[in-house]
Image (tube, helix red, strand yellow):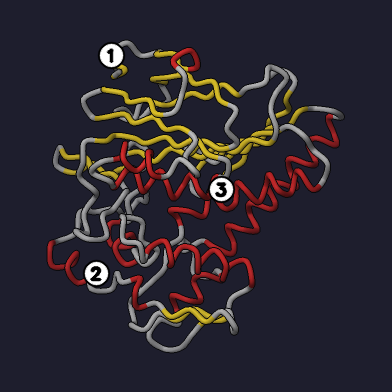
Amino acid sequence: MSDFLSQKYRGLGTVIELSLLEVDKSETTERLNQAHRKIAHYEDLFTVNRAFSELMTVNQFAGLKAAPLSEEVYTLTKKAVQISQEHFGFNASIGPLVRLWHIGFADARVPSEQEIQDMLALVSPDRIVLDDQKKTVFLPQKGMSLDLGGIAKGYIADKVVEFWKETGLSTGIVNLGGNIRFLGLPQKGHWRVGIRNPLTHGTSLVLQVLTTSSSVVTSGIDQRYLERDGKSYHHILNPETGYPHVNNLASVTVFSEKSLDGEIEAKRMFFSEEPEKVFAKRQDVIQAAVLITKEKEIKILGLKPKDVRLIDKHFKILN
């Protein structure tokens, strides 16, 4: 990475790192800062962690009237609602539950069963009304709310790479914390990606992977969590139960062309009881995947053994 110029920023609830192949230092720095401003712009549109944003207008109008949206906010919202209506685990209407648990924030707590049941009644993507002509979204019941946190990072990462391409740049990296999007390829002809240990809350790596994929997205239980009374609760909530999803997976990493697709498919695999079957069916989108279980077992899908290096010997790669 010595040929790259990198800058770190804070946004999207994480540390953002942007890197570009350095040509002229001042010009490259400005391109990095432009990309960061673009990310901040999208965060202003999609965040539900502030009182005001375009998406928050939809939530504030819930039960009252349809909210008119800009083209790009409507397009992503429509995509999120349609994916939610497949009912595989991702759910854009999960806002009431996310707010209730608020995992990753100072006021996070374990709600009562009654509170969870009350919020579950508001989680219903099939009831959301979309109007393509007027570009409006209507949540029919007061208290319903959208949260696009599960896919917005992927959309934003793709948009940054698109912007860099349009300005004539050839090689770069967008790292949005658990979501990495590449532009082009480095001189070696592949990217080297580290996959973190999802059973600790640090930055130690389990694997290194060589890839030519444009996007690497990880969904895991270590990214945001809450510890109460000796028990750990991760942030990936199951919209059917209202609790953090229970399975044997600690993380799913998906290699794909687009980050938005990676976000969706990582969640599809994380929620599935048979993630390998999901990979087999979705290979038009999922180029490769790495599954890490809570028992420290690793399943490699679609990668050549020579492109994978085990770093943490406490883990075992399954054949």
- The amino acid beneath tag 2 is Met
Query: Which class describes the residues within 10 Å of circle 1: few (<14), some (14-19), or many (20+)?
Result: few
Q: In the rendered structure, which disc, 2 or 1, sits on the residue that comes first in sequence?
A: 2
**Label 1: which secondary element:** loop
Mark closer to the observer (2, 1): 1
Image quarter of residue 277:
top left
Residue holding disc 1: 314
Find the distance from the CA under tag 1 to the CA under tag 3: 33 Å
Q: Is residue 140 above or below residue 156?
A: below
Mark-to-mark CA distance, 2 and 1: 40 Å
Q: Is residue 68 left or right of residue 275?
A: right
Q: Who is closer to the viewer here, 229 or 199?
A: 199
The numbered mark at residue 91 is none
Q: Which amino acid lies under the numbered mark 3 shown in the image of this protein?
A: Gly
* Amino acid, disc 1: His
Where residue 195 sits in the image (x, y, percent)? Answer: 44, 26
Residue at the far bottom in the pictured view = 64
Q: Are marks 1 and 3 in contact (CB under 8 Å)?
A: no
Sequence-first tag of 3 and 2 = 3
Relative to residue 228, is residue 258 drawn left or right? right
**Residue 230, quarter of the rendered image:** top left
Distance from disc 3 to disc 2, alpha carbons, whole Å, reads 28 Å
Disc 3: CA contacts within 10 A as few (<14), some (14-19) or many (>=20): few
Residue receiving disc 2? 119
Q: Position of residue 184 (x, y in %)?
A: 70, 33
Choose the circle earlier in sequence order: 1 or 3. 3
Pick the front one: 184 or 17: 184
Task: Name the residue located 63 percent from the left edge and 35 percent from the top edge.
Answer: 182
Circle 3 residue: 11
Q: Residue at x 80, y 41 (%)?
A: 30
Q: Residue at x 34, y 43 (%)?
A: 278
